[in-house]
Image: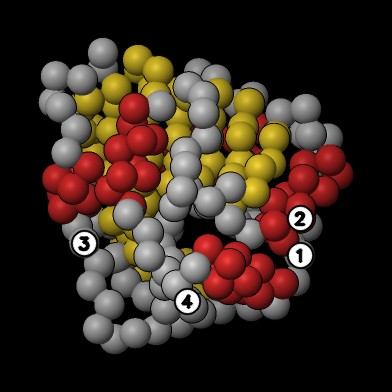
Amino acid sequence: MSTTDAVAFWDGVYAARPTVGDPRPNARLTETVTGLPPGDALDLGCGHGGDALWLAGQGWRVTAVDISAVAVERLAALALSHGLSDRVTTVRHDVHTSFPPSEFDLICAHYLHTPFDLDRATVLRSAAHALRPGGRLLVVDHGSAAPWSWDQDPDTRYPSPQEVAAGIDLAPETWTVERADAPRRIATGPGGQTAEVTDHILLVRRTA
């Protein structure tokens, strides 16, 4: 399917959901980043913007990208209303065709799943190469489907963090896998409902 189809799909997903005035960050982000010195961060697939706003509130300079114009426009307005517009730059960007040109101390890819064609290994490899020495790539994938997820296909297979790392195929003398596991947690959906879900977490640090 075309990029136009993907844009229309994701614009529809976000337009169908009400704007969240104070979106919460992902739990795996806060547990990983708390205590790290702030620098330049890239939020791949920023969605409702909870991660970008939280990072900016912690002193990070955040570039937040999403294929959906609805998502990035809402986040830009939220950053302004939260007094964080000087720390959050929003960009509508299709990582299927290119990667944001810059270097970062942190790159987050939370639930970068799509029903459309996406060479995730190439995107995540580009992200690893965009890290400064000492920088980290945090990839958090679904390990199960929440009841409110757009993807309810029972045949969906969720690659393990180890499989994701193998697919990225990074040289061990330059990048180190700091975490690769599949913890469970209680998640809250957009309507306030809760469910136990599994996250697949991969944390990679550029060492050289």
Check contact, mark 2 vs mark 1: CB within 8 A. Answer: yes
**Taking 193 as reference, is 35 above or below it?**
above
100 and 155: which is toward the camera: 100
Q: Tell me the distance, in whole angstroms, between the alpha carbons under discs 3 and 2.
A: 31 Å
13 and 55: which is toward the camera: 13
The spot of residue 2 in percent (x, y) is 49, 68
Q: Which residue is mark 1?
A: 19
Say what amino acid the circle numbered 2 marks.
Answer: Arg
Check contact, mark 2 vs mark 4: CB within 8 A. Answer: no
The spot of residue 155 in percent (x, y) is 25, 83
**Taking 37 as reference, is 136 above or below it?**
below
* Residue shown at the point (22%, 50%) measured from the top left: 164
N-terminal-most mark, 2 or 1: 1
N-terminal-most mark, 1 or 3: 1
Say what amino acid the circle numbered 3 marks.
Answer: Pro
Q: Which residue is mark 3?
A: 159
Q: Provide the secondary structure element on which disc 2 rests.
A: helix
**Residue 52 is drawn in which quadrant?**
top right
Q: Which residue is mark 2?
A: 74
**Residue 115 is drawn in which quadrant?**
bottom left
